[in-house]
Amino acid sequence: MCLLLLLTGCATTAPTVPPQRSALAHWTPSPNFNARRAQLIVLHHTSIGNMEASRRVLSRAGGGNPVSAHYLIGDDGTIDQLVDDRDRSWHAGAATWAGVTDINSSSIGIELDNDGVAPFSSAQIQALIRLLADLTTRLGIPKQAVVGHGDIAPGRKNDPSVQFPWATLAQYGYGLWYDQPLIPAPPAFDSLAAMRLVGYDVSNPRAAIIAFHRHYRNMETEMLDATDASILYSLQRKLMAPR
């Protein structure tokens, strides 16, 4: 009996991961956060292209403009978590999506270590897809609710860059994407109204169009064409379909 108690007392259990953190990530906390609940996932690139330097920037306390993100993904697929999922990281700045202006209070921020010029590595994108699967399952965030920093801050931010493979994420069901083959939009179709329905702030139409092109066509031109109208028509049909 004494031996049994002794053995029981010596038994160890595997450490558990709090539900507000991801089991996929290394916990490297940042002090820059507040509490809140997430309904959106926002993707960024760091513009640094160096994992250690990115960690320092996202974890630096004080200063004139401290920033953070919930997650940082390296080029090799390493995932660091800097802020609990239940807390408000400081990643979005002045931004609007679907009429919501306090994006930090309603989102998870994911930084991809990338200089904004180079393509994103396969290992990094596969790690991102695994993390998106974890977050959408664990936190109940809709799979379509994945956007870029440039989408929510058109004219102010341009990340992730035109190199980002949104179509690859769409193959796994992440982000709002259009159906193929594209159907021509009706003659009276209002592309800007459809962009507003998707979530874009179209108060500056030029900036919104560039952001839309970056996301859906991997380019940064400022004029809408027939292909854009067809894409937006497909997105509008998806959003307005009975659920």
Image: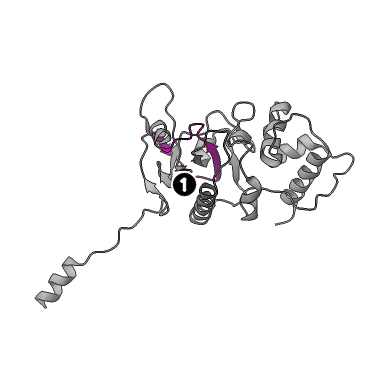
Residue 212 spot, x, y in % from top left: 70, 36
Report if residue 33 lies within the magenta region: yes
Report if residue 87 lies within the magenta region: no
Pick whichever, 163 or 41, lies toward us.
163
Seen in the picture, residue 171 relative to 198 is either above or below; the reply is below
Image quarter in which the C terminus is found: bottom right
Pick whichever, 139 or 227, lies toward us.
227
Most extreme residue toward the top is 64
Residue 241 as seen in the image, left or right of residue 107 = right
Most extreme residue toward the bottom is 1
Q: Name the residue located 36 percent from the left edge and 55 percent from the top edge.
A: 17
Find disc 1 in the rendering and name its residue. 76
Q: Name the residue located 51 percent from the left edge and 54 percent from the top edge.
A: 130
Residue 139 as seen in the image, left or right of residue 208 = left
Q: Name the residue located 82 percent from the left edge and 36 percent from the top edge.
A: 225
Residue 121 spot, x, y in % from top left: 54, 45
The stretch of residues the image draws in magenta is: 31-51
**Displayed quadrant of residue 82:** top left
How many residues crowd around disc 1 within 10 Å: few (fewer than 14), some, or many (20 or more)?
Answer: some
Residue 2 as seen in the image, left or right of residue 59 = left
Q: Which amino acid does label 1 sit on?
A: Asp
